[in-house]
Image (cartoon, rainbow, N blue to C red):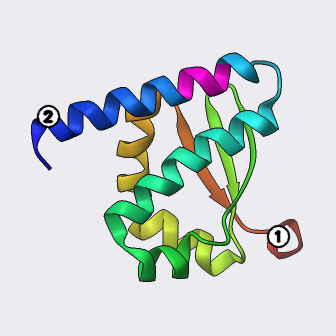
């Protein structure tokens, strides 16, 4: 990416995130959806539709509270795979949104032990 493109993308993300937070400041579920929408859009652009479809299409944002975005995957394997193979990229993209934002991918409650 060129530096100009990166700067424009960062500015757009920050503006969208501020807009989302200002509208939903007290609702951690709505904030989670807004933050995930931005991250998800970036992941699709960077990874392509095939990888995105395989690992991120079914991710559900649960809550964003205390700068922690909790995301649910379709199963335990997907959560582990994302955490192992994509967490560094996701952390980098999250930092662009908010320097204190952290994302955690978890499996559905029925699969957690």
* Above or below: residue 75 compared with residue 85: below
Of the numbered discs 2 and 1, the one sitting upstream in the chain is 2
Q: Which residues are magenta?
A: 17-21
Residue 61 pos. (x, y %): 71, 52
Residue 4 is marked as 2
Identified at 19% across, 40% down, the residue is: 5
Q: Relative to residue 64, is residue 8 drawn left or right?
A: left
Q: Is residue 19 magenta?
A: yes
Identified at 36% across, 61% down, the residue is: 45
From this viewpoint, is residue 60 visible? yes
Residue 113 is marked as 1
Identified at 60% across, 22% down, the residue is: 19
* Above or below: residue 67 compared with residue 2: above
Q: Is residue 56 magenta?
A: no
Which secondary structure type mostly characterizes the magenta part of the structure? helix
Q: Secondary structure at mark 2?
A: helix
Query: Within 10 angstroms of label 1, few (less than 14), some, or many (20 or more) residues?
Result: few
2 vs 1, front mark = 2
Residue 30 pos. (x, y %): 77, 37
Q: Secondary structure at mark 1?
A: loop
From this viewpoint, is residue 100 visible? no
Give the spatial CA distance, label 2 vs label 1: 46 Å
* Above or below: residue 67 compared with residue 71: above
């Amino acid at each position: 990416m060129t530096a100009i493109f990166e700067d424009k993308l960062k500015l757009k993300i920050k503006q969208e995130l501020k807009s989302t937070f200002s509208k939903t400041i007290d609702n951690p579920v709505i904030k989670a959806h807004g933050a995930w929408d931005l991250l998800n859009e970036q992941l699709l652009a960077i990874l392509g539709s095939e990888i995105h479809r395989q690992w991120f299409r079914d991710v559900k944002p649960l809550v964003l509270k205390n700068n922690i975005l909790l995301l649910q995957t379709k199963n335990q394997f997907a959560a582990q795979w994302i955490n192992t193979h994509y967490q560094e990229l996701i952390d980098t993209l999250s930092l662009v949104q908010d320097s204190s934002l952290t994302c955690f991918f978890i499996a559905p409650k029925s699969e957690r032990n």
